[in-house]
């Protein structure tokens, strides 16, 4: 029998989507085929400590770390695999002054725990989906599921993303941006610029976040001022963009490395004026936002959206997977690219896997595919020489 592939599944993390990540990871871990894979669950606390051991997911949920060990993947390819502390990890009361790990296990006492063949970061948002964890895994020389550093960072930063996809001719709503400091130093200059270039209504957003946190729809100067202040709570860089009139929210799942394919599009019917934090997570039961699979679109629209999704994915060096989100103006039929999520929600009822299911790829098969793609991307990267050698040299 061939040896099982060891998959370290990362979940939790330091972002506002800590709980969502735990839910996604629970689905992933219960669907990975035990005949093929050995799962090494690695939880990341809200403070950023990595934990492993018997049941790190339970430990994260209960904030009870007695049965867990401090874990690390060294950013040094000579120390491959997952390392873990010999002693217990106490709950981290206050990361600012308490020692990270108590009961004797500190970084010096970490010992090799397991080989890791591939890492599956099931982390959403900051410090997980934004290229930071991906950078760590690159340095450590471990294959991992999903996009690389550039892809993750570009998809996360709404301002950089817009500039790049616009340069490749993809349609996006008109926008202006500012740093927080420029906004604070001269608010009227930015308010005037938005009014001159965009008009109302507009959306204000922090450049790097997710889950609609810090996003406001603004209908006049006063709301714009409040919206920018709100966005400035969350980021150093701020974005303002024209509101797409009567926007329908269309989403497409993309899968693959250099030859990606797009699923049938789905549609979100938000429970509020827009797909806000409340509409995403707080409205439940009858009041919850709805997923429509497939979206009700004609053939030409479907084709256009799928082509745009694949093009956008390629432009930002997509790998593994991404959910590409569009805004379709109901009255005009115009389609705009909104954003790309490189680690989309991954519970069995989330849009990303549901769209593939509707397109003929069941959840378990999707996971196999993503792991194959991670190994393929790692192998393709490893082909590149890193040191100059003359082509004619012996
Ligand atoms: N330009 C826009 N026009 C219309 N609605 C928008 C626009 N930008 C954002 N929205 C609404 O706000 C929601 C969240 O914005 P989005 O840019 O997707 O941020 P997040 O990364 O937090 O999901 C969207 O799903 C949509 O409902
Ligand atoms: Mg969104």
Image: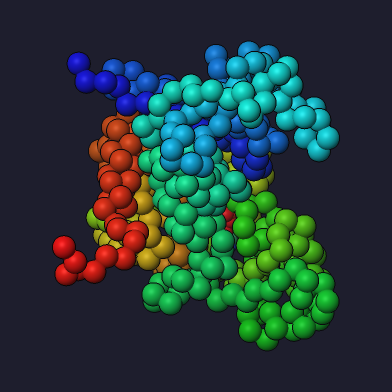
Front residue of 260/214: it is 260
Q: Is residue 306 above or below residue 224?
A: above
Please provide percent x and percent y for residue 113: 48, 21
Quarter of the image with the C terminus is bottom left
- Quarter of the figure with residue 49: top right
What residue sits 45% from the left and 75% below the top?
166
Question: Would residue 18 be found to the left or right of residue 83 on screen?
Answer: right
The residue closer to the viewer here, 52 or 86, is: 86
The N terminus: image quadrant: top left
Q: Is residue 75 visible?
A: yes
Question: Residue 65: which quarter of the image?
Answer: top right
Q: Is residue 136 above or below residue 182?
A: above
- Which residue corresponds to the image point at 50% horizontal and 73% vertical from the top-left? 163
Q: Is residue 134 visible?
A: no
Side of 166 relative to 198 (left or right): left
Q: Which residue occupies 51% across, 45% down?
A: 136
Task: Report x, y in % for residue 188.
Answer: 81, 81
Q: Give the camera-side residue of 129 and 138.
A: 138
């Amino acid at each position: 029998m061939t040896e099982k592939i060891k998959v370290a599944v990362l979940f939790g993390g330091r972002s506002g989507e800590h709980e969502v990540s735990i839910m996604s990871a629970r689905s992933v871990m219960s669907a990975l085929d035990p005949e093929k894979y050995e799962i090494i669950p690695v939880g990341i606390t809200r403070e950023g400590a990595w934990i492993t051991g018997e049941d790190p997911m339970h430990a994260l949920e209960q904030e009870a770390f007695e049965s867990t060990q401090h874990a690390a993947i060294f950013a040094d390819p000579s120390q491959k695999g997952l390392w873990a502390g010999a002693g217990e990890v106490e709950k981290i009361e206050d990361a600012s002054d308490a020692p990270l790990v108590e009961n004797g296990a500190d970084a010096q006492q970490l010992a090799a725990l397991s080989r890791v063949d591939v890492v599956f970061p099931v982390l959403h948002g900051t410090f997980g989906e934004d290229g930071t964890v991906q950078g760590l895994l690159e340095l450590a020389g471990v294959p991992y599921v999903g996009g690389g550093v550039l892809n993750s960072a570009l998809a996360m930063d709404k301002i950089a993303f817009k500039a790049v996809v616009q340069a490749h001719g993809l349609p996006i709503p008109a926008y202006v941006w500012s740093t927080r400091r420029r906004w604070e130093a001269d608010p009227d200059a930015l308010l005037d610029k938005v009014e001159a270039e965009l008009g109302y209504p507009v959306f204000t957003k922090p450049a790097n976040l997710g889950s609609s946190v810090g996003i406001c729809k603004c209908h006049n100067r006063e709301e714009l001022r409040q919206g920018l202040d709100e966005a400035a709570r969350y980021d150093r860089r701020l974005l303002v963009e024209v509101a797409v009139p009567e926007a329908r929210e269309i989403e497409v799942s993309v899968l693959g490395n250099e030859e990606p394919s797009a699923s049938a599009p789905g549609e979100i019917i938000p429970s509020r004026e827009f797909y806000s934090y409340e509409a995403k997570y707080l409205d439940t039961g009858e009041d919850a936002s709805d997923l429509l699979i497939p979206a009700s679109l004609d053939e030409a629209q479907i084709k256009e959206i799928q082509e745009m999704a694949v093009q956008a994915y390629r432009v930002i060096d997509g790998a593994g997977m991404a959910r590409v989100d569009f805004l379709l103006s109901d009255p005009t039929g115009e389609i705009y690219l909104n954003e790309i999520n490189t680690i989309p929600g991954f519970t069995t009822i989330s849009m990303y896997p549901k769209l593939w299911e509707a397109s003929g790829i069941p959840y378990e098969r999707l996971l196999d595919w993503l792991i194959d793609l991670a190994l393929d991307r790692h192998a393709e990267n490893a082909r590149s020489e890193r040191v100059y050698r003359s082509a004619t040299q012996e």
